[in-house]
Image (cartoon, rainbow, N blue to C red):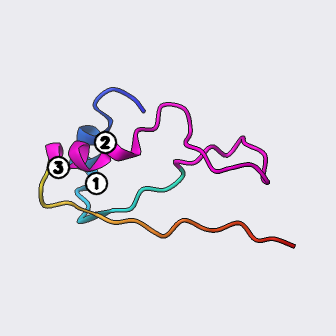
Amino acid sequence: MTRDYWPRILGRLRPRIVVPSHFDDVFRPLDGPMGFSKGVQLAALPDEIAAVSREIELASLPLLEPRSG
């Protein structure tokens, strides 16, 4: 993340909905537990988005479960 990321991006794009993606650590082993990329504070995202605009909806997709076999 860079300084003032959400105000800069959301101010230009003016989305109605934000769906976080690519927050997982893509450098972990495929059979390892899921983890966040360095510096990601996903729990803080609702407050960060609301600080820019309370009209932007925040949505999420279900996490994928690893397949065995």
Mark 1 or 3, which is nearer the eye? 3
Identified at 27% across, 39% down, the residue is 8
Q: List the residue tagged with mark 2.
A: 44
Amino acid at dot 2: Ala
Q: List the residue tagged with mark 3.
A: 50
Q: Is residue 43 magenta?
A: yes
Q: Say what secondary structure mark 2 lies in.
A: helix
Q: Mark 2 or mark 1: name the one nearer the start of the chain.
A: 1
- Res. 13 mark: 1
Identified at 40% across, 65% down, the residue is 60
Q: Mark 1 or mark 3: name the one nearer the start of the chain.
A: 1
Q: Where is residue 40 in the image (x, y as percent from the top left)?
A: 46, 38
Amino acid at dot 1: Leu
Q: Say what secondary structure mark 3 lies in.
A: helix
Amino acid at dot 3: Ala
Q: In this view, does 66 lie to the left or right of 40?
A: right
Mark 2 or 1, which is nearer the eye? 2
Q: Where is residue 43 in the image (x, y as percent from the top left)?
A: 35, 45
Q: Does the magenta stretch include residue 49?
A: yes
Q: Position of residue 27 (x, y in %)?
A: 72, 41
Q: Which of 23 and 32 is in front in this view?
A: 32
Quadrant position of residue 68: bottom right
Give yes or no for contact between labels 2 and 3 (Cβ–Cβ under 8 Å). Answer: no
Judge the density around disc 3: few (<14), some (14-19), many (≥20) Cα neighbours within 10 Å. some
Identified at 46% across, 69% down, the residue is 61
Identified at 39% across, 62% down, the residue is 19
Q: Give the range drawn in magenta.
A: 23-52
